[in-house]
Image: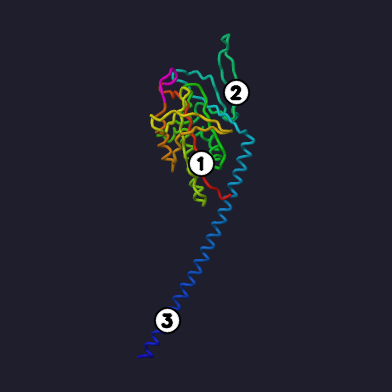
Amino acid sequence: NTKANEKLYNEALAGKDEEVERLRRELEDMTKAREMADERASKFERCWEEEMRQRRSLQETVFALQGNIRILCRIKPPCSGNARKCIAASSMTGEVELENASADGRMQLSKFEFSYALDEKASQTDVYKTVSPLVGAFCDGADACVFAYGQTGSGKTHTMQGDLASEGQRGVFARALDDIFLHASTREAGGIPAYTVTVTMLEVYNDTVRDLLAPASASLLDVKMGGSRVRVPGATELAVGDAEQAMRALEEGKRRRATASTGMNADSSRSHMVLSVRLSGESNN
Protein backbone atom coordinates (compact mmCIF):
# COMPACT_ATOMS: atom_id res chain seq x y z
CA ASN A 1 0.00 0.00 0.00
CA THR A 2 2.84 2.31 0.82
CA LYS A 3 4.39 1.84 -2.60
CA ALA A 4 1.02 2.29 -4.29
CA ASN A 5 0.38 5.53 -2.40
CA GLU A 6 3.86 6.78 -3.23
CA LYS A 7 3.23 6.01 -6.89
CA LEU A 8 -0.06 7.91 -6.86
CA TYR A 9 1.65 10.82 -5.08
CA ASN A 10 4.44 10.97 -7.67
CA GLU A 11 1.94 10.83 -10.52
CA ALA A 12 -0.09 13.63 -8.96
CA LEU A 13 3.05 15.68 -8.38
CA ALA A 14 4.14 15.15 -11.98
CA GLY A 15 0.71 16.31 -13.10
CA LYS A 16 1.03 19.43 -10.96
CA ASP A 17 4.48 20.10 -12.42
CA GLU A 18 3.03 19.89 -15.90
CA GLU A 19 0.20 22.26 -14.88
CA VAL A 20 2.70 24.72 -13.39
CA GLU A 21 4.79 24.56 -16.58
CA ARG A 22 1.70 25.17 -18.71
CA LEU A 23 0.70 28.16 -16.61
CA ARG A 24 4.27 29.48 -16.78
CA ARG A 25 4.24 29.31 -20.58
CA GLU A 26 0.84 31.01 -20.66
CA LEU A 27 2.15 33.76 -18.39
CA GLU A 28 5.16 34.25 -20.66
CA ASP A 29 2.89 34.45 -23.71
CA MET A 30 0.61 36.96 -21.96
CA THR A 31 3.61 39.04 -20.88
CA LYS A 32 4.94 39.13 -24.43
CA ALA A 33 1.49 40.05 -25.78
CA ARG A 34 1.23 42.84 -23.18
CA GLU A 35 4.68 44.14 -24.12
CA MET A 36 3.73 44.13 -27.80
CA ALA A 37 0.45 45.93 -27.03
CA ASP A 38 2.29 48.53 -24.94
CA GLU A 39 4.78 49.03 -27.77
CA ARG A 40 1.98 49.49 -30.31
CA ALA A 41 0.18 51.92 -27.97
CA SER A 42 3.39 53.89 -27.47
CA LYS A 43 3.95 53.98 -31.24
CA PHE A 44 0.37 55.13 -31.80
CA GLU A 45 0.78 57.87 -29.20
CA ARG A 46 4.01 59.10 -30.85
CA CYS A 47 2.29 59.11 -34.25
CA TRP A 48 -0.70 60.98 -32.79
CA GLU A 49 1.54 63.60 -31.19
CA GLU A 50 3.47 64.05 -34.45
CA GLU A 51 0.21 64.41 -36.38
CA MET A 52 -0.97 67.04 -33.88
CA ARG A 53 2.29 68.98 -34.30
CA GLN A 54 1.95 68.86 -38.09
CA ARG A 55 -1.68 69.92 -37.84
CA ARG A 56 -0.81 72.94 -35.71
CA SER A 57 2.00 73.85 -38.08
CA LEU A 58 -0.32 73.67 -41.10
CA GLN A 59 -2.97 75.71 -39.29
CA GLU A 60 -0.43 78.39 -38.44
CA THR A 61 0.66 78.49 -42.10
CA VAL A 62 -2.95 78.81 -43.30
CA PHE A 63 -3.70 81.55 -40.77
CA ALA A 64 -0.56 83.41 -41.78
CA LEU A 65 -1.64 83.29 -45.43
CA GLN A 66 -5.26 84.21 -44.76
CA GLY A 67 -4.57 86.74 -42.04
CA ASN A 68 -5.44 86.56 -38.37
CA ILE A 69 -8.60 88.60 -38.94
CA ARG A 70 -11.10 87.35 -41.49
CA ILE A 71 -14.48 88.82 -42.32
CA LEU A 72 -17.51 86.87 -43.47
CA CYS A 73 -20.45 88.70 -45.03
CA ARG A 74 -23.74 86.81 -44.81
CA ILE A 75 -26.70 88.10 -46.80
CA LYS A 76 -30.03 87.96 -45.01
CA PRO A 77 -33.04 86.78 -47.07
CA PRO A 78 -35.26 89.67 -48.22
CA CYS A 79 -38.27 90.62 -46.16
CA SER A 80 -41.65 89.30 -47.27
CA GLY A 81 -43.18 91.45 -49.98
CA ASN A 82 -39.78 92.68 -51.20
CA ALA A 83 -39.42 90.77 -54.45
CA ARG A 84 -36.67 92.90 -55.97
CA LYS A 85 -33.15 91.62 -55.34
CA CYS A 86 -30.58 94.38 -55.00
CA ILE A 87 -27.61 92.47 -53.55
CA ALA A 88 -25.58 89.48 -54.70
CA ALA A 89 -22.75 87.55 -53.03
CA SER A 90 -20.15 85.23 -54.54
CA SER A 91 -18.87 82.46 -52.30
CA MET A 92 -16.08 81.81 -54.83
CA THR A 93 -14.53 85.28 -54.79
CA GLY A 94 -15.87 86.77 -51.56
CA GLU A 95 -17.32 89.71 -53.49
CA VAL A 96 -20.63 91.39 -52.70
CA GLU A 97 -22.41 93.63 -55.22
CA LEU A 98 -24.99 96.10 -53.99
CA GLU A 99 -27.33 98.09 -56.20
CA ASN A 100 -28.82 101.23 -54.66
CA ALA A 101 -30.13 104.61 -55.66
CA SER A 102 -27.82 107.62 -55.81
CA ALA A 103 -28.77 111.13 -54.69
CA ASP A 104 -30.10 111.97 -58.19
CA GLY A 105 -32.26 108.84 -58.26
CA ARG A 106 -30.14 106.81 -60.64
CA MET A 107 -29.25 103.22 -59.74
CA GLN A 108 -25.58 102.54 -59.12
CA LEU A 109 -23.62 99.38 -58.40
CA SER A 110 -21.17 99.16 -55.48
CA LYS A 111 -18.73 96.29 -54.96
CA PHE A 112 -17.19 95.07 -51.70
CA GLU A 113 -14.63 92.36 -50.99
CA PHE A 114 -14.60 90.08 -47.95
CA SER A 115 -12.68 87.01 -46.86
CA TYR A 116 -15.88 85.01 -47.38
CA ALA A 117 -19.33 85.86 -48.70
CA LEU A 118 -22.52 83.82 -48.41
CA ASP A 119 -25.78 84.63 -50.16
CA GLU A 120 -29.29 84.47 -48.72
CA LYS A 121 -29.56 80.73 -49.46
CA ALA A 122 -26.65 79.83 -47.19
CA SER A 123 -27.50 77.52 -44.29
CA GLN A 124 -26.26 77.55 -40.71
CA THR A 125 -23.98 74.67 -41.69
CA ASP A 126 -22.45 76.74 -44.50
CA VAL A 127 -21.69 79.54 -42.05
CA TYR A 128 -20.09 77.21 -39.54
CA LYS A 129 -17.81 75.68 -42.18
CA THR A 130 -16.02 79.04 -42.39
CA VAL A 131 -15.65 79.16 -38.60
CA SER A 132 -14.70 75.56 -37.82
CA PRO A 133 -10.93 75.99 -38.53
CA LEU A 134 -10.83 78.54 -35.70
CA VAL A 135 -12.45 76.01 -33.38
CA GLY A 136 -9.80 73.44 -34.31
CA ALA A 137 -7.04 75.94 -33.57
CA PHE A 138 -8.72 76.82 -30.27
CA CYS A 139 -8.75 73.14 -29.25
CA ASP A 140 -5.03 73.03 -30.02
CA GLY A 141 -4.34 75.88 -27.59
CA ALA A 142 -4.78 79.08 -29.62
CA ASP A 143 -7.01 82.01 -28.67
CA ALA A 144 -9.94 82.50 -31.03
CA CYS A 145 -12.87 84.90 -31.29
CA VAL A 146 -15.97 85.00 -33.49
CA PHE A 147 -17.76 88.35 -33.46
CA ALA A 148 -21.09 89.13 -35.16
CA TYR A 149 -21.69 92.72 -36.26
CA GLY A 150 -24.72 94.27 -37.92
CA GLN A 151 -27.69 96.53 -37.44
CA THR A 152 -30.81 95.56 -35.51
CA GLY A 153 -32.65 92.76 -37.28
CA SER A 154 -29.74 91.77 -39.52
CA GLY A 155 -29.57 88.23 -38.13
CA LYS A 156 -26.73 88.30 -35.59
CA THR A 157 -28.57 86.26 -32.98
CA HIS A 158 -29.80 83.79 -35.61
CA THR A 159 -26.25 83.25 -36.90
CA MET A 160 -24.53 82.96 -33.55
CA GLN A 161 -27.23 81.34 -31.44
CA GLY A 162 -29.94 80.13 -33.80
CA ASP A 163 -32.61 77.70 -32.64
CA LEU A 164 -30.91 75.48 -30.07
CA ALA A 165 -33.74 72.94 -30.27
CA SER A 166 -33.40 72.44 -34.03
CA GLU A 167 -30.44 70.44 -35.35
CA GLY A 168 -30.39 72.26 -38.69
CA GLN A 169 -30.95 75.76 -37.29
CA ARG A 170 -28.42 75.76 -34.46
CA GLY A 171 -25.91 78.58 -34.68
CA VAL A 172 -22.18 78.94 -34.24
CA PHE A 173 -22.27 78.62 -30.43
CA ALA A 174 -23.84 75.17 -30.32
CA ARG A 175 -21.87 73.75 -33.24
CA ALA A 176 -18.57 74.98 -31.81
CA LEU A 177 -19.32 73.37 -28.44
CA ASP A 178 -20.15 70.09 -30.20
CA ASP A 179 -16.78 70.17 -31.96
CA ILE A 180 -14.92 71.06 -28.76
CA PHE A 181 -16.33 68.04 -26.92
CA LEU A 182 -15.75 65.80 -29.95
CA HIS A 183 -12.11 66.91 -29.98
CA ALA A 184 -11.90 66.30 -26.23
CA SER A 185 -13.22 62.73 -26.58
CA THR A 186 -10.76 62.02 -29.42
CA ARG A 187 -7.96 63.37 -27.27
CA GLU A 188 -8.99 61.16 -24.34
CA ALA A 189 -9.22 58.10 -26.60
CA GLY A 190 -5.63 58.78 -27.64
CA GLY A 191 -4.44 58.52 -24.05
CA ILE A 192 -4.23 62.28 -23.47
CA PRO A 193 -5.97 63.66 -20.35
CA ALA A 194 -9.39 65.13 -21.11
CA TYR A 195 -10.05 68.86 -21.13
CA THR A 196 -11.84 70.72 -18.39
CA VAL A 197 -14.38 72.96 -20.17
CA THR A 198 -15.89 76.03 -18.51
CA VAL A 199 -18.33 78.54 -20.00
CA THR A 200 -19.21 82.12 -19.12
CA MET A 201 -22.19 84.04 -20.54
CA LEU A 202 -22.40 87.80 -20.16
CA GLU A 203 -24.86 90.40 -21.40
CA VAL A 204 -23.92 94.00 -22.17
CA TYR A 205 -27.13 96.03 -21.95
CA ASN A 206 -27.44 99.81 -21.59
CA ASP A 207 -23.76 100.11 -20.61
CA THR A 208 -24.11 97.51 -17.87
CA VAL A 209 -22.73 93.96 -17.72
CA ARG A 210 -24.90 91.14 -16.38
CA ASP A 211 -24.05 87.52 -15.64
CA LEU A 212 -26.52 85.35 -17.59
CA LEU A 213 -25.56 82.23 -15.64
CA ALA A 214 -26.24 83.84 -12.27
CA PRO A 215 -29.64 84.47 -10.58
CA ALA A 216 -31.47 87.56 -11.75
CA SER A 217 -30.82 89.22 -8.39
CA ALA A 218 -27.05 89.00 -8.83
CA SER A 219 -25.16 92.30 -8.81
CA LEU A 220 -23.83 93.91 -11.96
CA LEU A 221 -20.25 93.27 -13.05
CA ASP A 222 -17.31 95.45 -14.02
CA VAL A 223 -14.91 94.91 -16.91
CA LYS A 224 -11.22 95.09 -16.02
CA MET A 225 -8.21 95.34 -18.32
CA GLY A 226 -5.08 93.43 -17.33
CA GLY A 227 -2.30 93.71 -19.89
CA SER A 228 -3.64 92.24 -23.12
CA ARG A 229 -6.45 90.40 -21.31
CA VAL A 230 -9.97 91.49 -20.46
CA ARG A 231 -11.32 90.18 -17.15
CA VAL A 232 -14.74 90.30 -15.54
CA PRO A 233 -14.21 89.55 -11.84
CA GLY A 234 -17.10 87.71 -10.24
CA ALA A 235 -18.49 86.25 -13.48
CA THR A 236 -19.78 82.70 -13.19
CA GLU A 237 -17.47 80.09 -14.72
CA LEU A 238 -19.62 77.01 -15.13
CA ALA A 239 -17.86 73.68 -15.64
CA VAL A 240 -19.65 71.56 -18.27
CA GLY A 241 -18.92 67.90 -18.83
CA ASP A 242 -20.50 67.38 -22.24
CA ALA A 243 -22.27 69.17 -25.08
CA GLU A 244 -25.71 68.44 -23.63
CA GLN A 245 -24.84 70.13 -20.34
CA ALA A 246 -23.40 73.08 -22.26
CA MET A 247 -26.65 73.37 -24.27
CA ARG A 248 -28.65 73.54 -21.04
CA ALA A 249 -26.43 76.40 -19.88
CA LEU A 250 -26.98 78.21 -23.19
CA GLU A 251 -30.74 77.79 -22.88
CA GLU A 252 -30.65 79.15 -19.33
CA GLY A 253 -28.63 82.19 -20.42
CA LYS A 254 -30.90 82.71 -23.42
CA ARG A 255 -33.98 82.95 -21.19
CA ARG A 256 -32.34 85.71 -19.14
CA ARG A 257 -31.47 87.97 -22.08
CA ALA A 258 -33.23 91.30 -22.53
CA THR A 259 -35.53 91.30 -25.57
CA ALA A 260 -38.10 93.70 -26.96
CA SER A 261 -39.85 94.41 -30.23
CA THR A 262 -38.44 96.87 -32.75
CA GLY A 263 -39.46 98.11 -36.16
CA MET A 264 -37.07 95.56 -37.66
CA ASN A 265 -37.69 92.56 -35.41
CA ALA A 266 -40.63 91.47 -33.25
CA ASP A 267 -38.34 89.79 -30.71
CA SER A 268 -35.04 91.62 -30.99
CA SER A 269 -32.10 90.95 -28.70
CA ARG A 270 -31.75 94.33 -27.06
CA SER A 271 -28.25 93.57 -25.83
CA HIS A 272 -24.88 92.13 -26.75
CA MET A 273 -24.16 88.60 -25.53
CA VAL A 274 -20.64 87.28 -24.96
CA LEU A 275 -20.08 83.54 -24.62
CA SER A 276 -16.60 82.61 -23.41
CA VAL A 277 -15.28 79.05 -23.40
CA ARG A 278 -12.11 78.12 -21.54
CA LEU A 279 -10.22 74.87 -22.00
CA SER A 280 -7.83 73.54 -19.38
CA GLY A 281 -5.84 70.40 -19.99
CA GLU A 282 -2.48 68.71 -20.01
CA SER A 283 -0.32 67.80 -22.97
CA ASN A 284 2.23 65.02 -23.39
CA ASN A 285 4.28 67.23 -25.75
Alpha-carbon distance for marks 3 and 2? 93 Å
Numbered range of the magenta stretch: 258-265
Q: Which residue is mark 3?
A: 13
- Label count reads 3
Q: Amino acid at mark 2?
A: Phe
Q: Amino acid at mark 1?
A: Leu
Alpha-carbon distance for marks 1 and 3? 62 Å
- Does the stretch in magenta take in 264? yes
Viewer-side label of 1, 2:
1
Q: How far from the left and from the top, in percent, is residue 119?
A: 52, 27
Point out the residue furthest to the top here: 104
- Counting residues from the start of the chain, the first of labels 1 and 3 encountered is 3
Viewer-side label of 3, 2:
3
- Does the stretch in magenta take in 25? no
Q: How far from the left and from the top, in percent, is residue 266?
A: 41, 21
In the depicted structure, whether residue 243 falls above or below residue 50: above
Quadrant of the snapshot with the N terminus: bottom left
Predominant secondary structure, magenta span: loop
Q: How far from the left and from the top, in percent, is residue 67?
A: 62, 33
Q: Amino acid at mark 3?
A: Leu
Label 2 crowd bin: few (<14), some (14–19), many (20+), radius 10 Å:
few
In the depicted structure, whether residue 187 falls above or below residue 119: below
Q: Secondary structure at mark 2?
A: strand
Residue drawn at x 53%, y 59% as measured from the top left: 38
Q: Which residue is mark 2?
A: 112
- Counting residues from the start of the chain, the first of labels 1 and 2 encountered is 2
Q: Which residue is mark 1?
A: 279
